[in-house]
Structures are given as structure tokens and as C-alpha cells.
Amino acid sequence: MCDRGKLNNKRGSTEPLNGDSAFQKFARSNSASGIENAAPTGRVDVTNNRKETALIVATQNNTCRAMATLIRLGVEINLQDVQSNTALHYAVWTMSEKAVEILSAAAADFNIPNSDGHDPSTRTRLNKTPLHIALDKAGNSMLHITCTGKSANILRHMFEIFLDLNIRNLSEETPLHLACALNNTAVVSELCARRADITAQDSRKRTPLMTA
């Protein structure tokens, strides 16, 4: 089964015998207060029958408030489920920039392989990974979107994943076009240092510097 198929089977699963603790249940419903209240009564990184921590469940369901609360309470970031997937694997598969950013800021490991031998930044899967799929109506990839933000940590990981820094959106804009248009000087400098194409033209024949 493909990675996304596995995820769809997991997301929202609430069968009564899955061994969920209160933490998994609150993580699924994005209840930060529920997690806070349950914290004195048990371990936040307790696992269910699929070896899923509450953080993994929260990431599968893209419940970011729950993720942030669990991390603040000291959940182990890199624990693996029964298929050896970490929370970061699911963040990548759900194409959630926010989830990836939360986990990156907490020093999640991008190099842990799952049972299929795939880690979140496996370069041999670059043409298949959801990070390369357009995430919005403008056709922007995760790299485009990351280059419009300020997170140096997540940007560094995107550079590890994307070999082509000149990937185009539907308007033929590269990530450098977007960074220049927003006057995001730190990202522009980093892209130029990594030899992004400063002469690339978008659909209106504009180079990145012409959009600044």
C-alpha cells in the first residue's frame, strides 16, 4: 500500500481495541487542555497497540495545538510506531508545513528510516514525495511556500530534500521569485549562495530581481 493509503487508513481511526490512552484521544480531537489535564496522571509518550504516541496521532490528524502541547510537556519526538514511522514521516505525507515546522523546531530527526527504508528526506524518492506536489491553486511546492516564511530550520531541511531549487509554480515562478517579491533578504541570500538561477523568467518574463 502506498504511503498516503497507509495514512488514510490510520487517520481518524477510533476502533475501541486500539489501546488509545487519554493522550491519543485528546491528540486526535486537538484538545490541548485535555492533554494538559491528563499530564499529571500518566506519561505523555505512552503508546497504543500500534505503538503510536499521542504526538504521532496528532500529526496524522494535523492537530497542531495538540502537537505543540505534547512537545512542551516533553514527549519523545522521534519514537517510531509499529511500521517504524515517526511523527515527522506523517507530517511530510500530510503535506503540512505547520506540522513539519513544529517538529523541525523541536529537533525531529529527518534521517530515521521506516520499515520500508524511507526516511522523511530520502532523496531517492524526490519525484514521488508529497513535498513536490503543488500545495495550493498557484501550484506552489513546499519549497516555494517555505521561502516565503522566516523559519531557517525548516528551510534548511527543504534544501536537503529539494535538489532543484528552480522548481516552478503555475506562473513559472521559482522560489527565488517569491522570496524577492516579499523582500525576504535572508532567504534570497541563501538561495543565491546555493546557486539558484537569478536569470530565471516567470510567465511575464520577469527575473527574480525584477519582482523585488
Image (tube, helix red, strand yellow):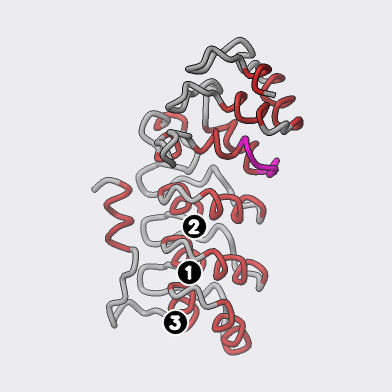
Viewer-closest of 169 and 101? 169
Instruction: Estimate how packed mark 2 is, as few (under 14), some (14 to 19) or many (20 or more) residues with alpha carbons within 10 Å.
Output: many
Looking at the rendered structure, the kind of residue marked 3 is Ser
Q: Main secondary structure of the magenta part?
A: loop
The residue located at (54%, 72%) in the rendering is 45
Q: Residue 53: which disc?
A: 1
Q: Magenta segment range?
A: 147-153
- Name the N-terminal-most of marks 2 and 3: 3
Looking at the rendered structure, the kind of residue marked 1 is Thr
Viewer-closest of 104 and 144? 144
Q: Are marks 2 and 1 in contact (CB under 8 Å)?
A: yes
Q: Circle 1 sits in a helix, a strand or a loop, which is it? A: loop
- Name the N-terminal-most of marks 2 and 1: 1
**Image quadrant of residue 78?**
bottom right
Looking at the rendered structure, the kind of residue marked 2 is Ala
Q: Residue 87: which disc?
A: 2
The residue located at (76%, 30%) in the rendering is 185
Q: Residue 21: which disc?
A: 3
Q: CA distance from mark 1 to mark 3?
A: 9 Å
Residue 111: image x %, image y %?
54, 42
Instruction: Estimate how packed mark 1 is, as few (under 14), some (14 to 19) or many (20 or more) residues with alpha carbons within 10 Å.
Output: many
Residue 35: image x %, image y %?
56, 80
